[in-house]
Image (cartoon, helix red, strand yellow):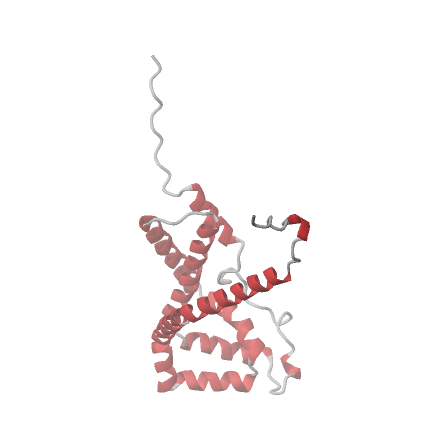
Amino acid sequence: MKTPDRQKPRDRLSIKTRAAIALIAVMPVAGLAQTSPSPEAAPNRLNSPAGLDYEQADAAVRELVKLTDVTQLRNVFTDQFIGRVEGAMSLLGGTLGPETMNIVTEQTRAVVSERIADGDALYSVLAPIYEKHFNLIELNQLVNFYESPLGQKLVRISPELLTESLDLGQQWGMSLVPEIVSRVRARMNGASAASLAAEPAPANDDYPAPAPAE
């Protein structure tokens, strides 16, 4: 008599979950794997209105990174990554269970925190953005602002501002749903009526006249 095979340990990550994580691996998530931009790759700031050079811009951006809330940035990157995992799972027709979701969140925070602790991870992400949109004068003004009490307050409450803005925006958007649905229905009904009116009338021989009453 053939004995049943010993049950293999259950894989904690389903095929769909692995596929979702693999899918987000090819998406631009947070850019933490980038290397610091070289002076050759940076824009020619000597020709900018502020006449800034790479060393000065580099120092200003690094100071800005120090003044911003690392925890906040870590949470932003983590939430973005997790959102992409959930989006990838929905594309694959599945969902993540609470236990798996907790593990994904835990390990994502750990990896992001380790990369940030390496030193240049945040700089490599933010430097090209700051350098693209701000000249040296503006970078120094940003540093001065974030060094001020008001700037530090903005850093502290930014997560709350973002959360409250998203919540209120969602509520406002939901309040528009009835009107949007009504307009869509009216437009579709109008289009259907116009389509019916444009159809040619049937030929008379298709519908013979009724016989006269006796």
Which residue lies at the image location 59% right of the left edge and 50% below the top edge? 212
Quarter location, residue 57: bottom right
Q: How many marks?
A: 0
182 shown above or below 55: above
Which residue lies at the image location 41% right of the left edge and 82% below the top edge? 146
Quarter location, residue 177: bottom left
Q: Nearer the viewer, residue 180 or 84?
A: 180
In the image, residue 160 lies at what x, y percent?
34, 74
Q: Residue furthest left?
A: 99
Q: Residue furthest front?
A: 214
Q: Would residue 104 be found to the left or right of residue 19 on screen?
A: left
Q: Locate the N terminus and report the quarter of the image it occupies.
A: top left
210 shown above or below 182: above
Q: Would residue 171 be found to the left or right of residue 63 on screen?
A: left
Q: Nearer the viewer, residue 171 or 117?
A: 171
In the image, residue 70 lies at what x, y percent?
39, 70
Q: Would residue 196 be found to the left or right of residue 159 on screen?
A: right
In the image, residue 127 lies at what x, y percent?
53, 72
Which residue lies at the image location 48% right of the left edge and 87% below the top edge? 141
Q: Nearer the viewer, residue 99 or 176?
A: 176
In the image, residue 148 lies at what x, y percent?
38, 86
131 shown above or below 4: below
